[in-house]
Image: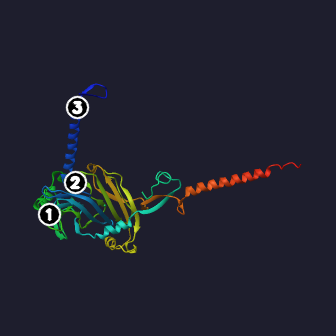
């Protein structure tokens, strides 16, 4: 039996089977590629790198960061939410100068989230839309270089902070970090070694943190306790270069605390940064208190800028974020509008308006009829 093609020429029936086999092969290839991307460990996160042990997997689902800068000292507080099957992992953070590390206050993020939450307002419209009666009867509302002659690697500090084993390293060679990782049972991927070279050239140091779950033998997953880094800096910089290793699109969310409204100097390979909140705040006067924020700022009023940015193509990231003061401390707050049909006492205003027009027309018609009757000549007298 033969089947005719679109041009009317005979076509073997087996061609359809061959097409089906090719389509199935393509589908299997796509599935295998997708599974491969899930198995491959994701080394990069927003401002550092995550390295799992052996063949295990770990990825950062979300990273929220708070950056505070007073012109001389910078603080970064990060909270990571991770998932995977890795019993342990190492997290590496480059810093421009020697850093101190301590546990952060998790309340800081909830306080800032409340301060920068969008304002919800109703916005009314007059004429009915497609989801309003009579068109639709349904209802309802639809973030210092080591001294000369120093060894290639130097552990300048090591402390235990909650579940974290924190090592602060000064390195003049990428192999320094590789040696530390190998000594602690981790292997530094070649592409991560290459990505770290610019930091070595700038004589940056590293904070290397060994992560482990609270329960021994359990996988490293869920929200980790926040870490707070503090280091000297005459400019506000947020390390992002390592995120170019990420295999999937990245989202950056930053809370920036400084004397003025701050903005990134450039997009560094991502979409244009978006300010979702800007305003001067005083932790001491916030309703309900803002103790964690007050501790972060020393209790002084500061300007808070919340920034969101997407990186659809992480491989295009070409540097670290450097932030500068904006031209003006213009306040801004995201407003989320809910469009609602304008009503009066529960009745759509357009219905009342139409009834008013009809009523006015009737009144005018009645008056015109009465006037016409009043002008009609009287009947003759017999």
Closer to viewer: mark 2 or mark 3: 3
Which corner quadrant of the image does residue 47 belong to?
bottom left
**Side of 151 relative to 101 (left or right):** left
Q: Secondary structure at mark 2?
A: helix
| Residue at the image position 53 percent from the left and 55 percent from the top | 126
Q: Which mark is residue 198?
A: 2
Residue that numbered label 1 is attached to: 154
Image spot of residue 374 (x, y percent): 79, 52
Distance from disc 2 to disc 1, alpha carbons, whole Å, reads 19 Å
**Side of 214 relative to 8 (left or right):** left
Depth check: 366 or 349 in front?
A: 366
Please identify the quadrant where the N terminus is shown.
top left
Distance from disc 3 to disc 1, alpha carbons, whole Å, reads 67 Å
Q: Secondary structure at mark 1?
A: strand
Closer to viewer: mark 3 or mark 1: 3
Residue that numbered label 3 is attached to: 15
Depth check: 286 or 34 in front?
A: 34
């Amino acid at each position: 039996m033969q089947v005719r093609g679109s041009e009317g020429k005979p076509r073997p029936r087996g061609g359809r089977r061959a097409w089906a086999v090719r389509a199935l092969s393509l589908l299997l290839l796509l599935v295998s590629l997708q599974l491969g991307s899930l198995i491959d460990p994701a080394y990069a996160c927003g401002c550092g790198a995550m390295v799992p042990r052996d063949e295990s997997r770990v990825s950062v689902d979300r990273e929220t960061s708070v950056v505070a800068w007073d012109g001389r000292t910078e603080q970064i507080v990060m909270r990571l939410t991770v998932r995977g099957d890795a019993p342990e992992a190492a997290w590496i953070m480059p810093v421009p100068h020697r850093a101190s590390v301590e546990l952060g206050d998790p309340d800081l993020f909830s306080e800032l989230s409340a301060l920068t939450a969008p304002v919800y307002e109703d916005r009314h419209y007059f004429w009915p839309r497609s989801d309003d009666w009579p068109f639709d009867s349904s209802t309802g509302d639809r973030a210092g270089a080591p001294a000369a002659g120093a060894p290639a690697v130097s552990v300048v500090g090591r402390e235990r902070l909650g579940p974290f084993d924190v090592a602060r390293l000064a390195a003049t060679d990428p192999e320094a970090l590789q040696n530390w990782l190998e000594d602690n049972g981790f292997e530094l991927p070649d592409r991560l070694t290459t990505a770290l070279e610019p930091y070595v050239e700038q004589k940056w140091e590293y904070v290397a943190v060994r992560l482990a779950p609270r329960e021994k033998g359990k996988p490293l997953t869920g929200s980790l306790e926040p870490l707070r880094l503090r280091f000297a800096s005459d400019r506000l910089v947020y390390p992002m270069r390592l995120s170019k290793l990420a295999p999937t699109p990245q989202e950056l969310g930053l809370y920036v605390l400084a004397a003025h409204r701050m903005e990134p100097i450039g997009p560094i390979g991502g979409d244009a940064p978006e300010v979702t909140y800007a305003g001067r705040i005083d932790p001491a006067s916030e309703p309900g208190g803002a103790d964690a924020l007050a501790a972060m700022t020393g209790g002084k009023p500061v300007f808070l800028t919340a920034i969101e940015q997407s990186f659809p193509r992480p491989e295009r990231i070409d540097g670290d974020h450097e932030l500068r003061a904006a031209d003006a401390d213009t306040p801004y707050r995201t407003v989320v509008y809910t469009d609602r049909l304008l009503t009066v006492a529960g009745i759509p205003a357009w219905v009342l308006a139409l009834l008013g027009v009809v009523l006015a027309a009737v009144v005018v018609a009645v008056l015109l009829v009465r006037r016409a009757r009043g002008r009609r000549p009287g009947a003759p007298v017999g």
